[in-house]
Every structure is written in structure tokens, then in C-alpha cells.
Image (cartoon, rainbow, N blue to C red):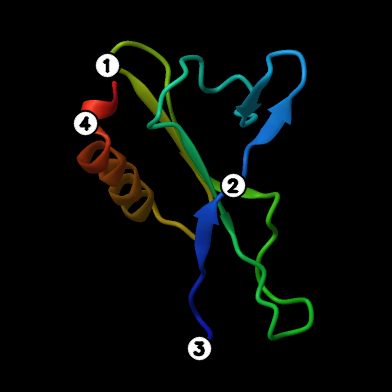
Amino acid sequence: MSGYTVLRNKAPRWHEHLQCWCLNFHGRVTVASVKNFQLVAIADQSQPGGKGDEETVLLQFGKVGDDTFTMDYRQPLSAFQAFAICLTSFGTKLACE
């Protein structure tokens, strides 16, 4: 079962000042949206030093304007894989905004 990476949504953290759950997009996402997300790799518990750092964001996608979004990705994802994952956020959340 080697050669693949399992991704999951990064858990938001409670922001005491804003009194809400937030993700840190480091200024890259400027508009709150249900389509905003960050994916991290799950650490492989079956191997010592297994793949995955649950703090390193491999893909982030978020809204920056009315009809404008930004996508940032890194290895092991390709541009095609990252774009395909981001497109899926539109198929399931059309009526949410």
C-alpha cells in the first residue's frame, strides 16, 4: 500500500478574537466562503517516520473576489490533480452561497 498519499481537510482552529473557526491562508484568501479549504497529508502510522505532516498544507483553495479563486499546491500533487480536486468543490456547494 505504498506509493500513494491520503489527504484530509485541515482542521480549523478557534480564533478567540473573532469568535469563530478559522484557517490560516497566510493572506492568499481574502473572502470567507464554504468553498475555501486546505488539504494536508495524513501521517502513515504503520511505518516509523511515515509519510505525512499534518501541518504542511499540500493544497489550498479559496475565494479572493466575486468570481475569482486562488489555488496553491505542492508536491506530491501535480497541477492537474490539484485543479481537479478544486473543481470538485463547485459541484457540491453550488447552493451554499
* Towards the viewer: 11 or 58: 11
Check residue 10 in the rendering and tell me which mark sits there, or answer none: 2
Label 1 or label 2, whichever comes before in sequence order: 2
The amino acid at mark 4 is Leu
- Residue bearing mark 4: 94
Q: Furthest-front residue in view?
A: 19
The amino acid at mark 2 is Lys
Q: Which of label 4 and label 1 is nearer to you?
A: 4
Mark 2–mark 3 contact, CB under 8 Å? no
Q: Is residue 92 visible?
A: yes
Number of on-image labels: 4
Describe the element under mark 4 as helix, strand or loop: helix
Q: For marks 1 and 3, give the CA distance.
A: 40 Å
Mark 2–mark 4 contact, CB under 8 Å? no
Check residue 38 in the rendering and tell me which mark sits there, or answer none: none
- Residue bearing mark 3: 1
> Residue at the location (65% across, 76% down)?
44
Q: Is residue 82 left or right of residue 93?
A: right
Label 2 or label 3, whichever comes before in sequence order: 3
